[in-house]
Amino acid sequence: MGKPSIVFMGTPDFAVPTLKVLFEAGYPIKTVYSQPPRPVGRGHKVQLSPVHHFALEHHLKVLTPSSLRYPESQKEFAELQADFAVVVAYGLILPKEILAATTYGCINVHASLLPRWRGAAPIQRAILAGDQKTGVTIMQMEEGLDTGPMILQEEIRLTPETTGQSLHDKLADLGANLIFPALEGLLTGRIILQPQPQKGVTYAAKLTKEEAFLDWRKPAQQLERQVRAFMPWPGSCFVWGSEKIKVLQASYESGSFSSQPGEVLDSDLLVACAHGALRLIELQRPGKSALKARDFLNGMPLPKGTQLDTSNDSL
């Protein structure tokens, strides 16, 4: 039996390793679907998605519909007569007509241990919540949000050094490694689909720019997790004067500090929080290079007793 034919559906960097391994293994990729090119940055230059870039570089056909709800898009998809659709962070809802249009269904690579962290931002939410482990679930898609039966699942441990970027890269590679046994297991019948547990369901809400603000009224441990989880986007920041200062690295100190949240406690940027204090280790001013705290303070003094904002009204 030859390799099954694939329609690949994905958009960001996270999806590229899975597309790459399928391509390099010789799977017949009938078409690649990705979200439409969009304007990016200050110049609003239209850019292709990372998946779109990869597909063009390897001479794969690419389609970028803005929606799959229209009959003409559904007809075009069905006419591909693919065995599988492999979906990785595509970002568009697949209606039932699409889900039913391949021989073996739509297979999704999801960056969490389902049913925990269904939804848009499972990588960052796992770190932010202080989870000890996360992983990748390969599931068969249905109309609900990440509710489909599980094909394979593999976990990894989170450490105090784990960032959103490092976890993104590990899970992207893990998902790529799991796609082959998942497809083979379904084709041969060696894998039996397992319904997701009804207990333990959580939802990973989409990230917003507003979440980047460091609210000193929160516990220091939570803010330290935020700095790691939101690296590189949306990042973590506070406002001083007219500038938005990014915090790229931080650590927390437990204990009781008789200070108001947001007060700078020493000459090395230890900031009081609701519980404990946050040590700011690496910072970046707008348009400037990232600096360690001592070098940062040479250009922007924040002496002991400085009171930083506890609201994001000035953002």
Image: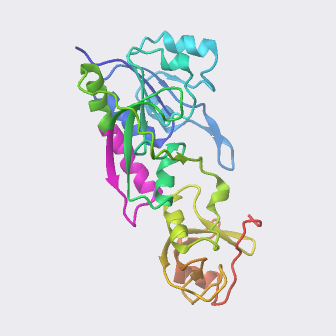
Q: Quadrant of the N terminus?
A: top left
Percent of width and height locating residue 18: 37, 35
The answer to whether residue 4 is visible is: yes
Percent of width and height locating residue 268: 54, 86
The answer to whether residue 231 is visible is: no
* Residue located at (70% from left, 83% from top): 307
Q: Taking 62 as reference, is 214 above or below it?
A: below
* Residue located at (64% from left, 52% from top): 208
Render colour scheme: rainbow
The quarter of the picture where residue 260 lies is bottom right
Percent of width and height locating residue 270: 55, 83
Residue 187 magenta-highlighted = no
Q: Is residue 272 left or right of residue 29?
A: right
Q: Is residue 35 left or right of residue 179?
A: right
The quarter of the picture where residue 140 lies is top left
Magenta residues span: 153-177
* Residue located at (50% from left, 65% from top): 225
Q: Taking 193 as reference, is 312 above or below it?
A: below
Residue 168 magenta-highlighted = yes
